[in-house]
Image (cartoon, rainbow, N blue to C red):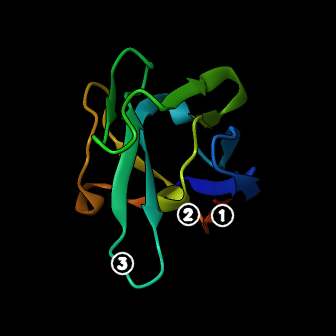
Amino acid sequence: QVQLVESGGGLVQAGDSLRLSCAASGRALSRYNMGWFRQAPGKEREFVAGISANGALTRYADSVKGRFTASRDNAKNTVYLQMSSLKPEDTADYYCAAASALYSVYASRAQYESWGQGTQVTVSS
């Protein structure tokens, strides 16, 4: 399995931007569909964004569409989540996940086989 480590979380104000990174080791990320999920206190973990193995396809939750952008650099074995116009309701622990798929972008947690430990994002009003 691929090992994933997220970074870039922090405390920001509403309207600010933040970029999360997810660095992989153990396997080449170029064969994985990558997803970003988040989990707020007391809530289920939910899909935020996903990107196909070659970066050609992306998919976003309605709540973040137009504000968040998923990207990847397979040469660096790293994926990113650029978050703009952050809102207090974006406050959550953010996780990256990997699924063995070349041409799909999954939104279901069950289809992801490897997960990072998460990074916390707090947006103050």
Quadrant housing residue 72: top right
Judging by the rendered image, the residue that carries numbered circle 1 is 122
Judging by the rendered image, the residue that carries numbered circle 2 is 91
Identify which residue is drawn at 69% across, 40% down. 16
Q: Badge 1: few (under 14), some or many (20 or more) residues near its Cα, within 10 Å?
A: many
Q: Badge 2: few (under 14), some or many (20 or more) residues near its Cα, within 10 Å?
A: many
Label 3 and label 1: CA atoms lie apart by 15 Å
Name the side, left or right, on which 68 lies relative to 51: right
Quarter of the image for the C terminus: give it.
bottom right
Label 2 and label 1: CA atoms lie apart by 5 Å
SS assignment at label 3: loop
Whole-percent x and y of residue 66?
A: 41, 26
Q: Type of residue at label 3?
A: Lys
- Do the CB atoms of the residues marked 2 and 1 lie less than 8 Å apart? yes
Q: Type of residue at label 1?
A: Thr
Identify which residue is drawn at 46% across, 72% down. 40
